Amino acid sequence: MFGRLGCVERARQIFDAIADRDSFSWGIMLSIYARSGDLSNAKGVFDRMPRWSLGSWTALLSAFALSGHHEEAKTLFDTMQERDLIAWTIMLTVLATFSNIEDAKYHFDQMPERDLVAWTAMLAANAERGQMENARETFDQMPERNLFSWTSLLSAYGRSGDVKAAGRVFDSMPEWNLVAWTAMLTGYSLSGDVVRAKRAFDSMPERDLIAWTAMLSAYAFNGHLRYTREIFQRMPERDLISWATMVAALVENDLLEESKELFDRMPRHCALSKGMTPNRVTFITLLDACSFLGALAEGRKIHAAVAERGFDTDLVVSNALVNFYGRCGALGDAKIVFDGMRRRDVISWSSMISAFAQRGRVDEAMELYHRMLSEGTLPDDIIFISVLFACSNSGVVEASGDFFRSIVGDTQVEPTLEHYACMVDVLGRAGKLRDAEDLLRLMPFHPGPLLYMTMLSACKLYTDVERGEAAAEVVFELDPENSSPYITLANIYSAAKRPKDAARIRKLMEERGIKKKPGCSWIEVLDRVHEFIAGDKMHPQRDEIYAEIQRLGRQMKEAGYFQDTKVVLQDVEEDEKENLLWYHSEKLAIAFGLISTPPGAPLRIVKNLRVCSDCHAATKVISKVTGREILVRDTNRFHHFQNGMCSCNDYW
């Protein structure tokens, strides 16, 4: 009884008081330790038992499985001379969760008998890995099914984006429970069908926290900020996922100050206290929230909690760690986590390749891609984008072309708009604007605003007015609320010494009510994220920050720095343009970092827009005159400034 209530110490006291222990009492004590996950004591009891029964072997096997010692569990299972259905099923669950699907399938086929639990474990293993044909085949072969079997298949279809198949399963179910309704709601949410998601939400006879959060996600990740706020306020309770979803929605809408305040209010410290038991979703949610804001120090604490609670062997949590470190620019940490993973899936490889790509490390990205292929993992479209992005950031035109042609001709992945956008970017940055134009014209689908904006950015690099005007006109029409084409075209005119045309575009922008997205930068200092906007005078240390800007300015000019006033769109005098440039958001964040951290400490800045040419040149000089390493993450890539140089080699 004490064991079932979790009173392990009391159970041990009673066990120690028994003078003449029989096999039953030994087995009970072993089972108590096994269920509590205390492997050391479970193994100690097992080793001291006068004789072993099938039940004791199975209890120790369960202890290995529950404590995450999966290789030891497999060794023990292979050692067992006699196995029952429970032992076979425990081992199947271990293989299905932590090994490759082929091992799980082989084990399943070898089982002398199978019950509903075994069938459902095999179904879940296929479903978790997105192998929907195998999952459906397993489901169809099941001699009996329960509600969990139905909802496992339904949830898998929803996660894979096949909402039609999910709907057919839902309609065929003998009864609908809360899990089934929530699975359909989640499927609609992931596919972007907000209308059907709302319909499912309104039709639910009852709603739990998961259902509320799924509806919150549907609004948040499909651009409906107002409804996201409403759902968040209406939620009867909130967990870390709902908090982080709201943070993400605010970040996506550039409400960085509000997102930072909400992030600081997230009950993450409570969730990681010893009184609560966080699961994988808790850790993934916290890591995602930290990656949005570049909160590296906070994320490191979460990583420590992950290791302390044994989740560092969990595939999904490890993927989240690689992604977190990659997005924070901590490439070494990302690689340590990646190299230490016992098992990797396509998301693991994609996250690590993307981390290299963001830093322009094309050789490492390509090497990792070929290593992935040699280890038998097939690439998906996201991995292709990451490799092409690495090529784009490094200006490797020939390698980019070869890789792009391999996507088109040698793989089963259909090229997407993003693949073509990467290739247009590669050609455009290399000055091959005619080739980029030809690719736009010859691609098998309509290019859309993304590709024309990519073309326009390339025209800015080479001051190609004619092609720039043509690309801008298309984006004006296809994406009328976007301020970027107006700003980029005005910059092209300024560079081409056509100030009247630049002024005309600024006036057109004003007449159409197009607002430039405000530049925001933030930096983490002493576990707190500080946000700055251009010309910011609201920070409590404003006077010290502005004084540091003045001091830096004198040093930078002595080092040969000249401001690039062409990036200032306001119609003001040259002196005023120079003054405006000093107070761009990333310069304020850097100045704050310099006065708030020890000499020589690296600075990490996150920016919501692409770094302008003046701030890029200025940060190079700052890194030299201060001896600081400065890492800036903008919307396009990472810039690693050190001793007057940038990792992008001025190619961004």
Image (cartoon, rainbow, N blue to C red):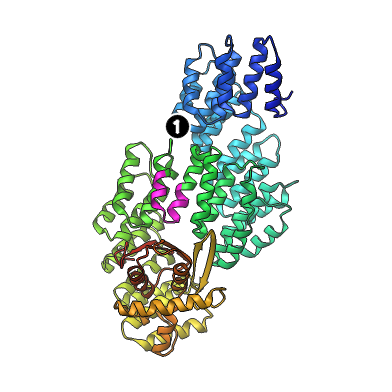
Q: Is residue 116 magenta?
A: no
| Pointer 1 local density, CA inside 10 Å: few below 14, some 14–19, many at least 20 | some
Front in this rendered view, residue 21 or 115: 21
Residue 167: % across, % down = 61, 43
Residue positioned 54% across, 40% down in the render: 308
Q: Which residues are magenta?
A: 322-336
Q: Is residue 610 visible?
A: yes
Instruction: From the top left corner, tell me how far across and down residue 527 is, in percent.
Output: 54, 58
Residue 453: image location, x then y, percent:
40, 69
The residue at the point 35 percent across, 83 percent down is 494
**Magenta stretch, main secondary structure class:** helix
User: Which image quarter holds the C terminus?
Assistant: bottom left
- Quadrant where the N terminus lies? top right
Q: 446 or 618: nearer the eye?
A: 618
**152 with respect to 572 (left or right):** right
Q: Is residue 644 above or below residue 362?
A: below
Query: Is 324 within the magenta?
Result: yes
Residue at the image point whose x is 48% and y is 72% from the top: 519
Q: Quadrant of residue 250?
A: bottom right
| Viewer can see residue 381 | no
- Identify which residue, 516 or 447, lies in the foreground: 516
Left or right of 64 on screen, residue 578: left
Q: Which residue is mark 1?
A: 100
